[in-house]
Amino acid sequence: MAPKSRSYQISATPATLFGHLLAMAITTLVLVWTLKFRGGFALESGIEEKILNYLFGFVLYVFPGGDMSSRGNFMPWHTFFGMVIFLLAVCTAETGLMERYKRSASRLTVGAHLFGILAIILMLVWLLHYRGGIDYESDNSDRVFNVHPFLMFFGFIFFAGEAMMAYKTVMSEHQGKKYMHALLHLIALCTGIFGICAAFRYHDMRQIDDMYTLHSWIGLGTFILYGLQWLVGAAAFLIPGGTPESRLRLIPWHMSMGRTILYLSICAALTGLMQKFTFLGLSKALGDRESHLINFTALAILLFGIFVDLSVALARYV
């Protein structure tokens, strides 16, 4: 068993890490391009460019001769099934690696990935179908606000969870895992800043006071702690000069603080969804599909956080 484990550790793990990094980099660049330069997402927009952006272009127009109306009607179904197929593909890849290399991925890690991707899909359906789209530069304040929940989960919480799991659950050389851990956290930090700016921009457009809700207190406090955690971690573990003894003393605090911040960020996300749920007046509409969608999104986010924490805490045992 030892030679197989060593062979996988040398050959396949760097490729897996590179694949994750490349996919996340491409996704980030496409989002920046679509939101900043192409006007954002809008499933029901009257602007043709935004409808094309929602699909990221191209596959819908393989079959010649279709009129724009029929293609427009097909778009949401095509996108939905594309997301479902992507989720199944990730599930297949994760479970395949888990079966072939038992030590490389636990069921908890697979569960964390699945719940994270499920939460992203549900949030996209909610924001694009029910809330009118995502557009930071829009004159529509609701579309500007929609950037906030999307980036605070996909950009901040999801990438932070990936960073934790990349360090604790991936079999690879220590230095590579450390740099991957720091890079993913940095991506989470940058996208989180963008997401918070969207919330403040929405408040300015609606002339709403800032920082007056429990969600805003928990959210901003958590993000400040996250930034401090990253700075202290980078200074202690990335910059040369720290003694091994000081690093060993800091490791338990660094790990405990990271897990605490993860749960605080989940708490901020859930209070934010609850606050939006209330502001939209959905509390009495128990049969409303949108209210159910928000609830399932919140449950998926909560389960993502739980599975990330368990996969990190039990990495040496499973």
Image: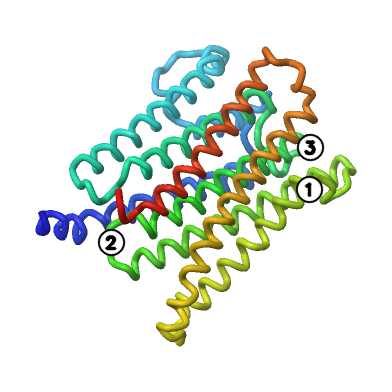
Which residue, given by chain and number where applicable, does mark 3 sit on?
Answer: 141
Structural distance between the alpha carbons of marks 1 and 2: 42 Å
Amino acid on which the number 1 mark rests in the picture: Arg
Who is closer to the viewer here, 66 or 313?
A: 313
Amino acid on which the number 3 mark rests in the picture: Ser
Mark closer to the chain start, 1 or 2: 2
Q: Is label 3 in a helix, a strand or a loop?
A: helix
Which residue, given by chain and number where applicable, does mark 2 sit on?
Answer: 172
Q: Are the residues tagged 3 and 1 within 8 Å (C-beta)?
A: no
Who is closer to the viewer here, 151 or 5?
A: 5
Packing grade of label 3 (10 A; few <14, some 14-19, many >=20) is some
Q: Is label 1 in a helix, a strand or a loop?
A: helix
Q: Tell me if I can see residue 186 in this picture.
A: no
Which is more foreground, mark 1 or mark 2? 2
In the picture provided, is 24 more to the left or to the right than 137?
A: left
Q: Are the residues tagged 1 and 2 within 8 Å (C-beta)?
A: no
Structural distance between the alpha carbons of marks 2 and 3: 45 Å
Who is closer to the viewer here, 207 or 209?
A: 209
Amino acid on which the number 2 mark rests in the picture: Ser
Q: Residue at x 22, y 46 (%)?
A: 102
Say if 213 sits above or below 252 in the image: above
Which residue, given by chain and number where applicable, does mark 1 sit on?
Answer: 201
Q: Position of residue 112 (x, y in %)?
A: 43, 41
Q: Tell me if I can see residue 294 in this picture.
A: yes
Q: Residue at x 51, y 73 (%)?
A: 234
Packing grade of label 2 (10 A; few <14, some 14-19, many >=20) is many
